[in-house]
Image (cartoon, rainbow, N blue to C red):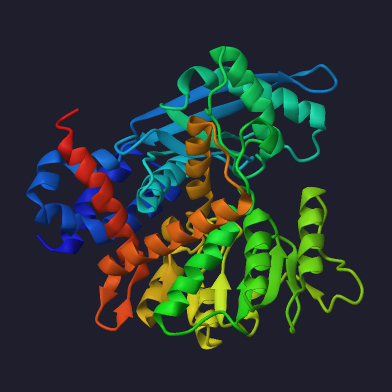
């Protein structure tokens, strides 16, 4: 059978088992496009039916979260933990609190996390979790009570050798602290069952910065493969959260001109590049729940309401906001504008149309499972530090992060090189798949 026929038959079965889960289908299709023939060509993978097994998570834990708001009224939310695959280590992946969270989104993220974690070469499986709880407009006390109620339901299913959640959208070190206290009370012991903790109780240096820093280290490796570097490159970044702003900080430090940051209302543009103080202001506005439409006077930045970063004059595009934020028309605008490299800071930020446009143009395109793996890499290092009872300095963690991102790049180009061109998407999918498939096929039918 041709690859197209194999892929069509496979996706028909996936969709039949998970009707309406469009985000999940999109993620599975992207990986299967590159790996379905790899499985069929390997008798061990085929006999173990690796692709069929990877189309279904190990388990989905769904639960009710009941908590009280400040008026004493009972509130009810939905919570989930998708334990996707522990073939190479305990489940590992973040918790996301957002009204758009659904089972489809969490399954897509857990699926992607499985291959992302495999690429780090750390012994980590893949998982994801969260709730449709919206912290916007809630008091600190309400958010704390929700976190405590959420973890009371989840605590029996996690642990340092079973499942190690971390933070994600709307879940930072503060929320992790509240949840860790509940887990600790449940387990009656102090173990590293969550990462992203505060430094005073087992957290790692530069965990907050890690995804953004790692993204830039990966971009530098991509440019280095072309005999180039970041110096004076015009970099467009979407988003205003930790990934976006810490990527901006690191890019500026490495000599790039960061032209944009953005939020849902528009884009902040500095033709001569944002400075570190303006990036810090953006981060503070985000932390305070404020917009970035009124930048400080004299910073050289203006705000374009309703616009996107991808219309600017750029060399490098780093989508760091959310999934499916960059569509086919935006991708064409990037290509027409001369952008030579896209690296994903968010998970699956390109729509299917954008993915096809970028692929057909032969643009260098790093998928999130490779380029944004820095966060989970440092989470893995935090787990090691907790186990060893020895905590590394910021410089030590940063050096380890840089090495991990360069190693990921090396593995990806080994499987993605096609003549003088590197297909980073294909390379990442195949390299991550092979690591997981080797483990699954070695364990028998269980």
Q: List x then y, in percent, for residue 95.
A: 56, 37
Q: Is residue 57 left or right of residue 218?
A: left
Residue beneath the point at 22% across and 46% down? 437
Q: List x then y, in percent, for residue 168.
A: 59, 43
Count all numbered tags in the image, as a single digit: 0
In this orientation, does residue 103 appear?
no
**Viewer-proximal residue among 104 and 396:** 396
**Viewer-proximal residue among 74 and 403:** 403
In this orientation, does residue 201 appear?
yes
Residue beneath the point at 43% across and 71% down? 365
**Viewer-proximal residue among 148 and 161:** 161
Note whether 230 is above or below 140 in the view shown.
Answer: below
Residue beneath the point at 81% across and 39% down? 137
Q: List x then y, in percent, for residue 442.
A: 16, 38
> Which picture quadrant has residue 262?
bottom right
Note whether 433 is above or below 386 in the view shown.
Answer: below
- The single residue placed furthest to the right in the displayed view is 297
Which quadrant is home to the N terminus?
bottom left
> Which picture quadrant has residue 188?
top right
Note whether 224 is above or below 444 in the view shown.
Answer: below
Q: Is residue 186 left or right of residue 367?
A: right
Q: List x then y, in percent, for residue 397.
A: 55, 51
Residue beneath the point at 46% across and 45% down? 109
Q: Is residue 40 left or right of residue 24?
A: left
Which quadrant is home to the C terminus?
top left
């Amino acid at each position: 059978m041709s690859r197209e026929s194999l892929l069509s038959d496979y996706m028909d079965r996936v969709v039949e088992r998970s009707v309406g889960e469009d985000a999940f289908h999109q993620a599975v299709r992207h990986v299967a496009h590159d790996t379905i023939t790899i499985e069929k060509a390997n008798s061990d993978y085929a006999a173990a039916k690796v692709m069929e097994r990877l189309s279904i998570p190990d388990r989905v834990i769904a639960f009710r979260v009941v908590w009280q708001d400040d008026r004493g009224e009972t509130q009810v939310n939905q919570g989930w933990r998708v334990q996707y695959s522990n073939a190479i280590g305990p489940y590992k992946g973040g918790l996301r609190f957002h009204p758009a969270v659904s089972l489809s989104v969490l399954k897509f993220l857990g699926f992607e996390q499985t291959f992302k974690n495999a690429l780090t070469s750390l012994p980590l499986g893949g998982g994801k979790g969260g709730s449709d709880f919206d912290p916007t407009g809630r008091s600190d006390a309400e958010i704390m009570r929700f976190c405590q109620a959420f973890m009371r339901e989840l605590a029996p299913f996690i642990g340092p050798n079973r499942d190690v959640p971390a933070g994600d959208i709307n879940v930072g070190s503060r929320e992790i602290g509240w949840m860790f206290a509940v887990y600790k009370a449940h387990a009656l012991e102090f173990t590293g069952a969550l990462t992203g903790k505060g430094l005073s109780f087992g957290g790692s240096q530069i965990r907050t910065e890690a995804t953004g820093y790692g993204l830039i280290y990966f971009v530098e490796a991509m440019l280095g493969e072309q005999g180039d570097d970041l110096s004076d490159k015009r970099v467009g970044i979407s988003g205003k959260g930790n990934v976006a702003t810490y990527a901006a900080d690191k890019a500026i430090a490495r000599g790039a001109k960061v032209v944009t940051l953005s939020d849902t209302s528009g884009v902040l543009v500095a033709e001569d590049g944002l400075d570190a103080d303006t990036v810090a202001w953006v981060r503070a506005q985000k932390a305070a729940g404020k917009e970035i439409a009124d930048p400080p006077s004299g910073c050289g930045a203006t705000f374009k309401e309703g616009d996107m970063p991808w219309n600017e004059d750029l060399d490098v595009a780093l989508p760091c906001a959310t999934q499916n934020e960059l569509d086919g028309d935006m991708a064409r605008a990037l290509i027409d504008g001369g952008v030579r490299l896209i690296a994903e800071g968010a998970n699956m930020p390109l729509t299917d149309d954008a993915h096809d446009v970028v692929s057909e143009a032969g643009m260098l395109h790093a998928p999130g499972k490779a380029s944004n793996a820095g966060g989970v890499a440092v989470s893995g290092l935090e787990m090691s530090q907790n186990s060893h009872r020895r905590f590394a300095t910021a410089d030590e963690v940063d050096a380890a992060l840089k090495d991990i991102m360069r190693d990921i790049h090396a593995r990806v180009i080994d499987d993605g090189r096609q003549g003088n061109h590197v297909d980073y998407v294909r390379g990442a999918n195949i390299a991550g798949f092979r690591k997981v498939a080797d483990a699954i096929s070695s364990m028998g039918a269980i």
